[in-house]
Amino acid sequence: MEKEHYTFVSNNAREFVKAHTTGDKEKIQQLVSDEVVLVEKENKLFARIDSSGEYEWQLFTKDAKGQFVDWVIQGHEYDGESKTFNIAIREFYLDSNGEPESPPTFLYLTFKLYDNEWKINSLAFDV
């Protein structure tokens, strides 16, 4: 499964990174499953992972001081038990002075197959 579906999942990951760093809510909506709810508030876009709102991640802010530069897949795996595909992504940003932001931002995406289409059913950030 990992070798067979890596191309599809990595392309969807690329599309997600592009969409979340530009605030393209419509594209993000196409890439996520119904388990991820997009919420807009105070010029920011959030992804809510569960209905309680306990797991809410900021995807985009119009007031960002940093600038997105690049990204790279740091790792990936298919979990046969949960039938999910996990991708770890490192995102690179420059601060307002043009210096690399530190610590780096890591994005973790979990994909699941829905009607022959890989969709993001969970995500998390780590810095």
Image (tube, helix red, strand yellow):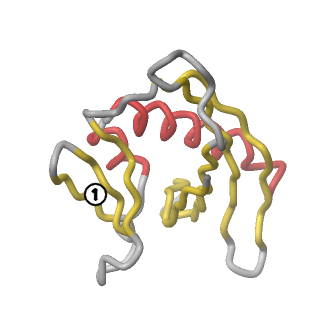
Residue at the front extreme of this rendering: 97
Residue lying farthest left? 42
Q: Amino acid at mark 1?
A: Leu
Q: Residue at x 69, y 53 (%)?
A: 87
Expressed as whole percent of the image width and height from the top left, the position of residue 7 reads: 71, 39
| Residue 19 x %, y % | 41, 35
Give coordinates of residue 68: x percent, y percent: 50, 26
Q: Position of residue 44 (x, y in %)?
A: 25, 46
49 in relation to 108, above or below: below
* Of the pair 122 and 41, the residue shown nearer to us: 41
**Farthest-out residue, top:** 98
State which quarter of the image contains the N terminus. Answer: bottom right
Residue for point 28% across, 42% down: 25
Residue ID at (48%, 40%): 16
Q: Relative to residue 8, is residue 119 drawn left or right?
A: left
**In the rendered image, the vertical position of residue 117 relative to residue 56, given as above or below:** above
Foreground residue among 85 and 51: 51
Quadrant in which residue 50 is drawn: bottom left
Query: Residue 40, relative to residue 99: is it above or below?
Result: below
At 35% across and 42% down in the image, what residue appears?
A: 60
Which residue position holds label 1?
Answer: 38
Q: Residues within 10 Å of mark 1 (few under 14, many from 20)?
A: many
Question: Looking at the image, which is closer to me, 17 or 98?
Answer: 98
In the structure shown, which secondary structural element does the residue marked by tag 1 occupy?
A: strand
Asked if 96 appears above or below 55 in the picture, the reply is above
Q: Is residue 74 left or right of residue 18?
A: right
